[in-house]
Image: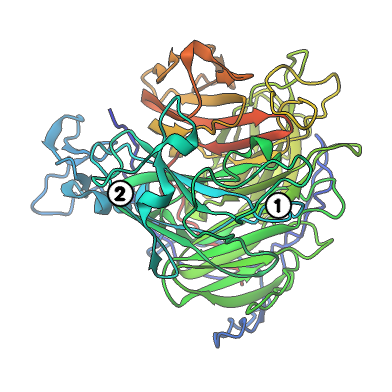
Amino acid sequence: MNRLTAAILMVPALVACGDDGRPADSDAGSATATATMTATMPTGTSEASDGSGTTGPTGSGTASTPTTSGATTDSGPIFDLGGAPDVPATLQCSPDLHAVVDGAGQVVEACAADQGCADATCVPACEAAGASKANFGCEFQIPTPPTSPFLPTPPCFAAFLTNSWGHPAKIEVSRDGVAFDLGSFARVVTPGQAPEDWSPVAPTGLGPGEVAVLFLSSHPNSIHPETMQSLNCPVPDAAGAATQVDASGRGLNFHVTSDIPLTAYDIAPFGGAFSYIPSAELLFPTSAWGTNYVAVMPPAGTFEPPGPLWLQVVGAQDGTTVEIRPTADLEPGPDLEGATKDVVKTFTVDAGEYVQWEVAAGAGDASGTLILSDKPVALHTGNRFLRLQPMPAPGGEATHQQNHAVTALGYEYVAGAYETRRADLAAEEIEYRVVGAVDGTTLIYDPPVPGAPATLAQGQVVDFTATGSFQIRSQDEGHPFVLSQIMDTCNIPGGTRPGATAMGFMQLLGDEEWVVLLPPAQFLQEYIFFTDPSFATTNLVVTRVDDGDGFKEVTVDCLGTIGGWQPVGGDGRFEVTTVDLVRADVGVNGCTNGQHTAESEGKFGLVVWGLDSYSSYAYPAGGNAIALTDLVIPPG
């Protein structure tokens, strides 16, 4: 049963400017339990655009003040129909959007298989998904993340699509207006088969419950320079060439559309256990994009020189005007001017295009950067080479994540600790990065986390460590923030537990990876997800919520009902567990890597981890982007 969660709320917002609150760049070279990295936001200085003819706003000499009021493009669907004369006020949409239900949750009308519910009415499925602000949708604009600068040529970049709607989905993929033949590069994941043997997507479309991998691009001769392992896609890719932008510049998205809502992720490189630099992310459809962002980046790390770190602003509509106030200098590139720290910069981005900026060498990272656009955009950030270790040693990874719009940020999160990699099985000390959205944010932890920040200012970045899972919350939804989790080096004192099998380096489990966490308010009731077959160990971190009627069982297809739940905090609302699907190439209860389903009668969160020798990737298996706050935080 499909139980993807939808919103039943609407929030308005209005842009304004106001008082000074200035976070600066962080020194991301260290991250300890007590180290805080704070910087001040600039006054609202403005700068001309990147040459497109658009002019930035006049500087007011004041910093950003979040405002609420009016209407916002980030609002969720309106299911409260009390003012509608022809629809009873009690009617609403079911959580999975497949039916119109009454106030007691009883089905009034079941929508057809190719339809969904919006505003208590059965409408085409794509329209329903778009209205819901869910993480599933019918249009994706996918930029290519830049991978490790130590690879001489870019490796296989792939996206994977899951269909949990219950009706076949016909998929189209294009780039720069040129359509690709889906049968040549898209494959349906088939358990027990090698990727090169997977079948093409059927002419009837991607079936219900199926996962398709789109092999999008690769340099024709991508090879790891140390192991000489091929990093090409297992089948010919769509572009037939590398598509990443090196340094700063403008790039072209892969435009993916379907007639039935899908969930999407990407990974670079596919089959990345043997690349030693893999990273993955959850992708949000254009219907869930926002117009206002407070950026979060991974740390710069301990490697010198770091990164480079980067950010991408992705367009879905022509002539989108964007204002950015970076917290670090951003380098210029072809057809792209640089952006100066603490100065508002105005630029444009078109449909199918992304603007990519690299952070200037030695400038730290650009977490806390403010972005505001006149049409929805996506924001992706990353680090082309993240190393986090106290002494020189092998290791380091590329990382990337799609950021969440301000309205989708939570004021309450559960930091579910990932499964320990330590040889003695003691809990790992895990690193976290938190970024404030507004001044005057106060934070409470349950259980307490020594060294974690008690307050946050707008754009302030703080790194801290914690052992075990914990709750973190601010005073209210008017004080949202960003929380991300970091896996550090596999060079752990005493070594790592079994689980790594990839040859070429020492078999130490996992390596640096960074994942942006979702608040429980964005959790779902079902996830169909993909795990990369090249990784020897796959582990799930699961967080379930008691919404007042008790905790619900969570099942994973090959595992059945999972257990091992541990309470998080003292209020009895959250529990966390970790479960292996595969460890050291041995499946648990017959599990194999590939397509999987997890479901429950209650809301739960799921983060997927794949690990091998000096390699790891992680991503949230899904989550909504519904509006949880009505804040707008302008850069100027």
Inspect this view and state whether residue 132 appears. yes
Is 630 located above or below residue 45 in the figure?
A: above
Q: Amino acid at mark 2?
A: Ala
- Mark 1 — residue? 383
Q: Residues within 10 Å of mark 2 (few under 14, many from 20)?
A: many
| Quadrant of res 596 | top left
Inspect this view and state whether residue 523 appears. no
Find numbered disc 1 in the image and state the secondary structure of the residue it sits on: strand
Q: Earlier in the sequence, mark 1 or mark 2?
A: 2
Pick whichever, 473 or 75, lies toward us.
75
Q: Looking at the image, what colour scheme do you see?
A: rainbow
Q: Amino acid at mark 1?
A: Asn
- Residue 2 is left or right of residue 238, and the answer is left
Residue extending farthest to the left is: 86
- Residue 232 is left or right of residue 519, and the answer is right
Image quadrant holding the C terminus, namely: bottom right
Find numbered disc 2 in the image and state the secondary structure of the residue it sits on: helix
Residue, x 73% and y 73% (percent of image)? 340
User: Which callout, 1 or 2, points to the residue nearer the camera?
Assistant: 1
- Mark 2 — residue? 129
Pick whichever, 238 or 351, lies toward us.
238
- Residue 437 is left or right of residue 453, and the answer is left
Residue, x 82% and y 63% (percent of image)? 361
Q: Residues within 10 Å of mark 1 (few under 14, many from 20)?
A: many
Pick whichever, 628 or 228, lies toward us.
228
Give coordinates of residue 387: x percent, y percent: 79, 43
